[in-house]
Amino acid sequence: MKRTVRQLADGREIIYFDERPDAPAREAVDTRDLPPVAATSEIRLDPLAGEWVALAAHRQTRTYKPPTDLCPLCPSRPGKPSEIPEADYDVVVFENRFPSFSEDVSGSPSTVDDMGLVPTAPGRGRCEVVCFTSDHDGSFATLSPQRVRTVVDAWADRTEALSIVEGVEQVFPFENRGEEIGVTLHHPHGQIYGYPFVTPKTRRMLEVARSYQEKHGRPVLGDVLAAERKSGTRVIAESEHWTAFVPPAARWPVHVLVVPRRQVPDIPALTSGERDDFARLYLDVLGRFDRLYDRPLPYIASWNQAPVRTERDLGWLHLELFSILRARDKLKYLAGSESGMGVWINDATPEQIADRLRAAA
């Protein structure tokens, strides 16, 4: 793989990941007249829940459902410059123009209204966009195994880079797909967040992992994985290094975990063989997703990685995929119980979900 770092017109970093070492030099210049990025991110600690909330009012003006010929993630064309100056690319990562968190945010920790009740701090971190392909009409599911491997290597590269950014406590690569999920740019892409705190979900999972380890002397996800493989009831696909299964307490109408057999804290820790093997299995799973209702399935794919600096020995890397589509033309809305109380009610059992995904092979 060939890695090339360049800058966009406003100073943001852009990184090209080319599959061929002899790929053409990436020397195209961003000709746009762009103002400097002016992020005003702030985080506030909810005094009742003990969770950080990010405030990023500057994102209100971000790009929203542009026409295809003005897609900012397609390669640049004569008269139509985009976020990617080159005329073609394999995989590209660049700093988000409308970041939720930014390295350039100024200020110091304080409290709301100087009353000492609600801590507040600058939303320092980093947010990046990952373009999986230059093909606007493609999807992750239509990528080649080689391209998926390039994406995995890009995720690993950026996880390592963001992990040493001052103030970043957790790195989160993810993909949102489909308008039903809230996607406003249809070009195949994902994002990577460098959070200035450990997220509430990860913090809770670490608490559970710590308690289980102290009681049983083993990782909880390791035991769950072993139990699922032994039962096979909810397993939908397996490979040499990975297992994809519906979690036994699935929250979503389509819900899958993709877990490596070996405990590793994050993507950079995966071996070359594990990365290649993931590419093949993941494409299998995504193909089943799209065949489930015979239509492109809206989904969120989120990588659960260990925090950058704390309790890394408790982390077990895994990918979580889920969809809000409960039938071809029916959405699962997060209503009172889910949104108000955080108590999930699923309209299908995990076993039914697994049966449907196995049938979609």
Image (cartoon, helix red, strand yellow):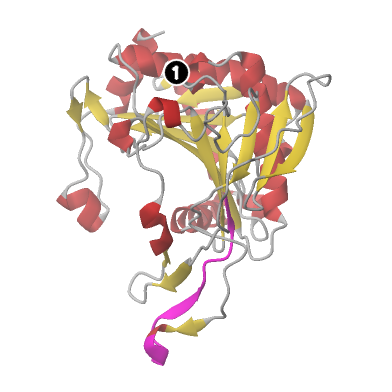
Please tell me which residue is depicted at 58% across the width and 59% down the height of the picture. Answer: 36
- Which of 88/267 is in front? 88
| Residue 68 in the image, given as x and y percentages of width and height | 40, 26
- Which of 319/147 is in front? 147
Report the residue that reaches farthest toward the front. 79
Please tell me which residue is depicted at 31% across the width and 22% down the height of the picture. Answer: 353
- Which of 195/60 is in front? 60
Please tell me which residue is depicted at 48% across the width and 22% down the height of the picture. Answer: 136
Question: In the rendered image of this protein, does residue 301 appear above or below residue 24?
Answer: below
| Residue 258 in the image, given as x and y percentages of width and height | 52, 29
Q: Quadrant of the C terminus?
A: top left
Left or right position of 203 against 339: right
Q: Secondary structure at mark 1?
A: loop
| Residue 94 in the image, given as x and y percentages of width and height | 62, 42
Quadrant hosting residue 84: top right
Question: In the rendered image of this protein, does residue 291 appear above or below residue 124?
Answer: above
Report the residue that reaches farthest toward the bottom. 115
Question: In the rendered image of this protein, does residue 298 appear above or below residue 158?
Answer: above
Left or right position of 309 against 198: right
Q: Is residue 7 visible?
A: yes
Does the magenta run of residues contain 126? yes
Does the magenta run of residues contain 37? no
The span picked out in magenta is 113-127
Q: Quadrant of the N terminus?
A: top right
- Which of 175/322 is in front? 175
| Residue 174 in the image, given as x and y percentages of width and height | 50, 39
Write down the residue under mark 1.
137
| Mark 1 crowdedness (10 Å alpha carbons): few <14, some 14-19, many ≥20 | few
Left or right position of 70 against 22: left
Give the total of numbered labels. Answer: 1
